[in-house]
Image (cartoon, helix red, strand yellow):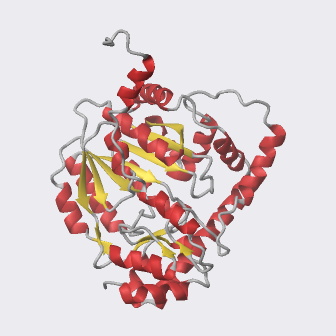
């Protein structure tokens, strides 16, 4: 019996549709997490997954968050939807922490809550993709592995430019700026606001000023990923580059994450801000953000943002959060110093910031360290410094020493 297209069963049609999908490469970091969990060795070291850990190897819920959550449990009266923009008060209270006094830019600035920094990046990418001509997005290498896929999935072209010189452990600024002279007017440049992931390397103030000059000259729009504010030099210092960019550039986009500096990894708390050239463009930008957000996730999750709002509305809880964040920052900085003192070839780590660093290790060396010493890191040599403890620094340095390339 011949089955026509009209009489073919819905189940068969679905199978044919799904059968056209191709296998995708597994996420290397998620695979690394699985390998670490399966390793029975008691002295194994996990430097792969990018979450903060204290010296006991734990990722605790911050005391300020616990207090805020208790208040929510006692006082919250509804779980009704807030709308596509999320918790507007959360965005309002967070803005001065990111931008400082916002009066100078607030008439040209609009923001919405997002599901984490990743949601902010995707929402911003979709907004850029709506612009006529679909500009190219320039991304320095290496970068967070999810950056390029986010922009490509939004339908944008991505071009890479050099950023980090692995041989010296420093930024190759001349090569970077030389490559960016190929960018066309209207293109977008992705920038790490602080605590570069994965290298930890940061531009100096003079380099930021020169880069702002180049962006202005080439008429490029900065898209700033600010995911680790407070974990590098401190809340104010880590926001300095973002503030300088917004002060100088007519347009800018800022994707922000609270997941790291408030320990809200599971709750996915972030925000996206857009600065326009003039106040007249704000309404259209906001309209587009809300339409896009509605189609992407409808309403962002409330709980984490509500907890942050509770903290920022209370001076005592704000002070407690800032003190806890400073403890985290100090611990990371101390580990950087300890590594640089224990191994001269890692001296560059002391001048970097944030949780991540790129070690001059070959992929073969990384695999050897995993097999022989139970040290788990990305194949690129990127480590999460916060995965070290005070008692593991010395054995870690001893293990990697024979494999360092510089």
Relative horizontal placement of residue 332, taking residue 241 as reference (left or right): right
User: Hey, which quadrant is residue 367 in on the image?
Assistant: bottom left
Q: Which residue occupies the extreme right position in the image?
A: 74
Which residue is more in the foreground, 392 or 213?
392
Q: Position of residue 279 (x, y in %)?
A: 41, 31
Q: Is residue 320 above or below residue 137?
A: below
Please identify the quadrant where the C terminus is shown: bottom left
Q: Position of residue 42 (x, y in %)?
A: 63, 79
Q: Position of residue 164 (x, y in %)?
A: 30, 68
Please identify the quadrant where the N terminus is shown: top left
Which residue is more in the foreground, 363 or 142?
363
Q: Which residue occupies the extreme top position in the image?
A: 6
* Total numbered badges shown on the rendered structure: 0
Q: Which residue occupies the extreme left position in the image?
A: 182
At 44% from the left and 29% from the top, the residue drawn is 292
Relative horizontal placement of residue 164, taking residue 236 as reference (left or right): left
Which residue is more in the foreground, 247 or 154?
154
Residue 247 seen in this snapshot = no
Relative horizontal placement of residue 261, taking residue 251 as reference (left or right): right
Q: Position of residue 253 (x, y in %)?
A: 40, 43
Residue 57 seen in this snapshot = yes
At 25% from the left and 29% from the top, the residue drawn is 132
Q: Is residue 100 above or below residue 394?
A: above
At 15% from the left and 52% from the top, the residue drawn is 182
């Amino acid at each position: 019996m011949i089955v026509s297209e009209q009489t073919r069963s819905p189940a068969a049609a679905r199978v044919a549709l799904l059968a056209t999908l191709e296998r995708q490469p597994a996420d290397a970091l998620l695979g690394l997490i699985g390998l670490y969990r399966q390793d029975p060795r008691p002295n194994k070291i996990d430097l792969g997954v990018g979450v903060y850990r204290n010296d006991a190897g734990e990722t605790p819920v911050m005391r300020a968050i616990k207090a805020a959550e208790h208040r929510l449990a006692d006082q919250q009266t509804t779980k009704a939807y807030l709308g596509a923009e999320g918790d507007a008060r959360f965005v309002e209270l967070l803005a001065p922490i990111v931008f400082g006094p916002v009066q100078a830019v607030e008439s040209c600035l609009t923001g919405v809550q997002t599901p984490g920094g990743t949601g902010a990046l995707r929402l911003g990418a979709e907004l850029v993709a709506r612009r006529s001509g679909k500009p190219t997005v320039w991304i320095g290498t290496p970068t967070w592995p999810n950056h390029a896929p986010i922009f490509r999935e939004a339908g944008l072209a991505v071009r890479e430019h050099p950023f980090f010189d692995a041989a010296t452990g420093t930024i190759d600024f001349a090569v970077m700026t030389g490559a960016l002279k190929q960018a066309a007017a209207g293109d977008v440049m992705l920038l790490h606001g602080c605590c570069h992931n994965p290298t930890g390397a940061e531009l100096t103030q003079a380099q930021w000023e020169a880069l702002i000059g180049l962006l202005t000259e080439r008429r490029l729009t900065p898209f700033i990923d600010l995911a680790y504010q407070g974990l590098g030099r401190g809340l104010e210092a880590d926001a300095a580059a973002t503030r300088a960019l917004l002060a100088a550039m007519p347009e800018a986009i800022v994707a922000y994450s609270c997941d790291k500096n408030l320990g809200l990894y599971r709750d996915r708390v972030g925000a996206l801000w857009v600065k326009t050239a003039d106040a007249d463009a704000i309404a259209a930008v906001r309209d587009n953000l809300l339409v896009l957000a509605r189609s992407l996730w409808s309403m962002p999750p409330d709980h984490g943002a509500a907890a942050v709002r509770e903290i920022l509305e209370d001076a005592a809880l704000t002070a407690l959060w800032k003190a806890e964040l400073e403890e985290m920052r100090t611990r990371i900085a101390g580990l950087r110093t300890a590594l640089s003192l224990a191994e001269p070839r890692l001296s560059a780590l002391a001048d970097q910031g944030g949780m991540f660093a790129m070690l001059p290790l070959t992929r073969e060396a990384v695999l050897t360290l995993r097999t022989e010493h139970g040290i788990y890191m990305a194949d690129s040599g990127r480590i999460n410094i916060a995965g070290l403890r005070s008692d593991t620094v010395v054995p870690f340095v001893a293990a990697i020493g024979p494999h360092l390339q510089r």
